[in-house]
Amino acid sequence: MGLPFHPFWLIILLAVVLIIFGPGKLPELGGAVGRGIREFRKASTEMRDEVTSSVSDKEPTGTPPAAATPAAATTTNSAADHKAEPEKS
């Protein structure tokens, strides 16, 4: 596809930066740009990981929650369980 700008403009831009900042500040300026790019990548990676983890936490895992057992099935109210003991005199 090609570059969105002509390489000639890049040469002119670098010449202007060299004139403004001088050859002594150029390595310092390059280091600052590199640190900025690293920080941007780190922040974007952290943001992507956070979004990915929050989305994966909200997605269902495919296993339905355990079904609740009805109360009647768990209680024993039969007459055999509650036999009346004979009264002792």
Image: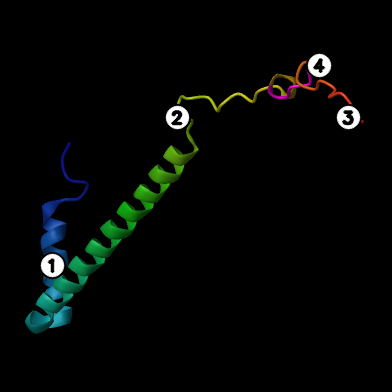
At 14% across and 59% down in the image, what residue appears? 10
The one nearer the camera, 12 or 21, is 21
The first of marks 4 and 3 along the sequence is 4
Q: Dot 3: within a 10 Å radius of its alpha carbon, few (fewer than 14), some, or many (20 or more) residues? A: few
As rendered, which of 68 and 42 lies closer to the eye?
A: 68
Q: Are marks 2 and 3 in contact (CB under 8 Å)?
A: no
State the residue position of label 3: 88
Label 2 – label 3 distance at C-alpha = 60 Å
The reply to whether dot 3 and dot 1 touch (C-beta < 8 Å) is no
Q: Can you identify the residue that label 2 sits on?
A: 61
Residue type, mark 2 in image = Thr
Q: Earlier in the sequence, mark 3 or mark 1?
A: 1
Report the disc number at residue 79.
4
Which-is-in-front pick, marks 2 and 3?
Answer: 3
Q: Quadrant of the C terminus?
A: top right
Position of 2 relative to 65 (above/below): below
Picture quadrant where residue 67 is located: top right
Residue 53's x, y, as percent? 40, 44
The residue drawn where x is 23% and y is 62% is 37
Q: Which residues are magenta?
A: 74-79
User: Does the segment drawn in magenta span residue 4?
Assistant: no
Quadrant position of the N terminus in the picture? top left
Q: Amino acid at mark 4?
A: Ala
Label 2 crowd (10 A; few <14 / some 14-19 / many >=20): few
**What predominant SS class does the magenta segment belong to?**
loop
First in sequence: mark 4 or mark 1? 1
Q: Nearer the viewer, mark 3 or mark 1?
A: 3
In the image, residue 38 above or below residue 17:
above
